Amino acid sequence: MLMSASSDFIALCREQIALLTQGLGATISIVYLTQELVETPSGDAKLIPVVIYPETALLSPGEENAEATVHKQLQVENVFILPNHQRRLLTAGSESPTSSPESEIPDASRPHLKEEYLFSGNQIVLPLVYEGVMMGLLVTGRKDRGWNEHEESQIQRIAQTLAIACILDQRRAWFEQQLREQQILQEKQRDLLDNLLHQFRNPLTALRTFGKLLLKRLRPADTNRNVANSIVRESDRLQELLQQFDQVIDLTGADLAPLHLPKEVFVEATIQKDAKPPLLLPGTGDKAVDCSLADILEPLLISAKAIAQERKLKLITEIQQNSPLVRANVKALREVLTNIIDNALKYTPTGGKILIQAGQEKANFQGIVISDNGPGIPPQDLEHLGERHYRGVQAQTEIPGTGLGIAIAKQLIEQMQGKIEVFSPAINSKLTSPDAPGTTFIIWLPEVGS
């Protein structure tokens, strides 16, 4: 079990030690927390000091910087072991530590206590126990005199207070760990859902467009018009359901914000977040294969041309058929190209142009270039391009979007050892103008054998 001491617990320990020092005249007091060493066959208990008074009580001989040494030793060095045969802990009313060698902390294992603090006759060692579980020790003592019964009773109450505070602190750490794990799970589920919804929109848009085109081409008396009408109607219905679904699951940034936890002194180890499991993306589990960019683009261009015709856009293609093969995950690459082509179609205004080129070469990479003469991407938005849910100035327009297309594309291309370059204004001067600077995306993939 990971056990951490929070700043609140440390503050309470210091307050209780102040009672021992100022109220009872203790000249040395140490609060230890214990952690069973699971891999130690002897079952030794490791005791780690978390609060010490005075701080100079744990200085190594010859140390000059007392404060720096105490901090270093608290974190690394000051651990002593109580073997099984030496674990009899003294409580108030027990026999003096000097009367039994096994009751003392062995010299070879104790922290580096200064010689003036090596007294035992007036020392009390109390276990911090709650419901039969030992969580640490309270060690206190004074040089000039022993303890009377009333003082021992007060020290016992202080130990009980520390024990209760310790178990509450452990429970706090456990609850915080559960909150972290729940938050990681929530983020994973949100990303999964976002990716699935985004992938659903692109084929839905194409299906809806095909239905409209089919409806236009059929004669009024054609019996198939009912089929085409049904395709458009059901596509519209699915689109409405998607919008409603978006509204239901639209969590704000504050809902998924990381927990702001108090600073902690960790006794054994910090609670670490597990790496996020892979998101459900196209091609997950599929192996990369040798493929032709022209073959990958062919079915995508059929859909793109239909959508461009519906939106009164001019789609220009320049595809080299005999370019070298690339190594890619086919499903993932189609998702990347669909996302970027869909953005070009979506953000290019009526009458605009889109140019798709394949066969560009650069340093053992093959490229697909997608350019448009739309409004372009402002410099401040280019810096955030690829961040999930970031839309920048486009969020202020009526054009629907989730800010996920480029983020998913970037993630998938990087998994294929490729890269994406973005230029705005577009790099094709024949396509653009000052009023329509446009944007160019270049998807680079490694050639086979490179």
Image (spheres, rainbow, N blue to C red):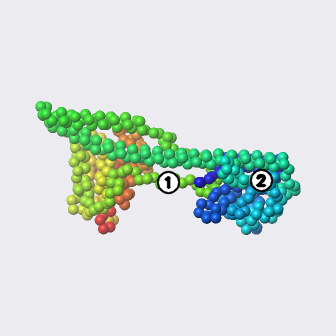
Q: In the rendering, at what x and y percent does residue 432 appear?
A: 30, 48
Q: CA distance from mark 1 to mark 2?
A: 43 Å
Residue drawn at 64 percent across, 49 percent down: 6
Instruction: Say if residue 134 shows up in the picture.
Output: yes
Q: In the rendering, at what x and y percent does residue 414 appear?
A: 38, 57
| Residue at mark 2 | 91
Front-lying residue, 47 or 59? 47
Looking at the image, residue 42 sits to the left or right of residue 223; the answer is: right
Front-lying residue, 360 or 236? 236
Residue drawn at 22 percent across, 59 percent down: 320
Nearer-N-terminus badge (1/2): 2
The image quadrant of residue 240 is top left
Looking at the image, residue 57 sits to the left or right of residue 443; the answer is: right
Checking the image for residue 309, the label placed there is none
Q: In the rendering, at what x and y percent does residue 227 appear?
A: 19, 36
Front-lying residue, 347 or 285? 285
Above/below status of 214 relative to 52:
above
Task: Name the kind of residue labelled 2 in the image.
Answer: Thr
The image quadrant of residue 416 is bottom left
Residue at disc 2, secondary structure: loop
| Residue at mark 1 | 274
Neighbor class of circle 1 (other Cα within 10 Å; few <14, some 14-19, many 20+) is few
